[in-house]
Amino acid sequence: MENITKEMEILEAKAKVLKALSHPIRLCIVRGLMEEEGCNVSKMQSCLEIPQSTLSQHLAKLRNLGILEGERNGVEINYYVIDEDAKKIVKTLF
Amino acid sequence: MENITKEMEILEAKAKVLKALSHPIRLCIVRGLMEEEGCNVSKMQSCLEIPQSTLSQHLAKLRNLGILEGERNGVEINYYVIDEDAKKIVKTLF
DNA sequence: TTACTATATTTATATATTACGATATTCAGA
DNA sequence: TCTGAATATCGTAATATATAAATATAGTAA
């Protein structure tokens, strides 16, 4: 039964997106990026009031899971939400 | 600014629901319960092929987080999805 | 009662996540 | 090339999560 394996893969993929969003800070980041496309890290930091390394690690996780993509602009990096499921979830919740 | 605190509380509450759903087995349980209202545990178990205690613990987590509610029917317990955000998320994803 | 079935809880262990200071990297401008 | 700003990565301690065997509980029926 290949179907069962495939079903499991789908569930795992969806669960991965949910996990990526399942932390208040990351949820806040993604929601923020949907409101203000291409926000940079410093701007996020001033909103979130957490240490820079903590924020950067959350961004790294979102990047590695394919939720966000960063675009360098000089010394700054602008982030965008690229995962469609993540966008849908956030739109649904807020 | 009370609003910032309140915003954080909302983010935490939403993140909690996402976390509840962010495991493939739990996502499968909740999706299954939305298709077949009030499924009982044995039925779920035959689908999921995991040990009984593992399944029961996932159910406990979903119950404790207010995602599900169980209703005893004799020796069986039927589960229902009661959290609206969880329902919306699953509908959105599948 | 006793025995059986369905489900929950406990316990132990392995694994993953989170947080954050310290340090490194990357780029722009002097 | 040196400096400073923006961002990433490393090291590590604290905490949380996942798994499953063993045990407990609740209900039904003989």
Image (cartoon, coloured by chain):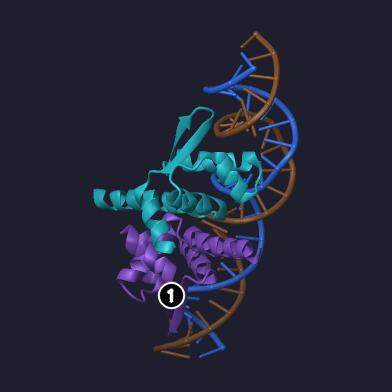
Chain colours: A cyan, B purple, C blue, D brown
Please rate how many residues cluster around mark 1, counting C-alpha atoms within 10 Å: few if below 14, some from 14 to 19, many from 20.
some
Q: Position of residue B51 (x, y in %)?
A: 45, 60
The residue lying toward the viewer, choosing from A49 and A74, is A74
**Res. A1 visible in picture:** no
Figure check: D22 above or below A3: below
Tell me which residue sits at (45%, 60%) in the image.
Answer: B21
Residue at figure coordinates x 42%, y 57% from the top left: A90
Q: Secondary structure at mark 1?
A: loop
Q: In front here: A7 or C26?
A: C26
Name the spot of residue A8 as percent of width and height, x first: 34, 52
* Residue pictured at 54% horizontal, 28% vertical: A75
Give whichever of B10, B48 is nearer the camera: B10
Can see residue A63? yes
Q: Which residue is mark 1?
A: B82
Q: Nearer the viewer, residue A75 or B81?
A: A75
* Chain under callout 1: B
Look at the picture and state if C3 lies above or below A20. below
- Amino acid type of the residue that numbered disc 1 sits on in the rendered structure: Ile
**Image location (x, y in percent) of residue B1:** 66, 63
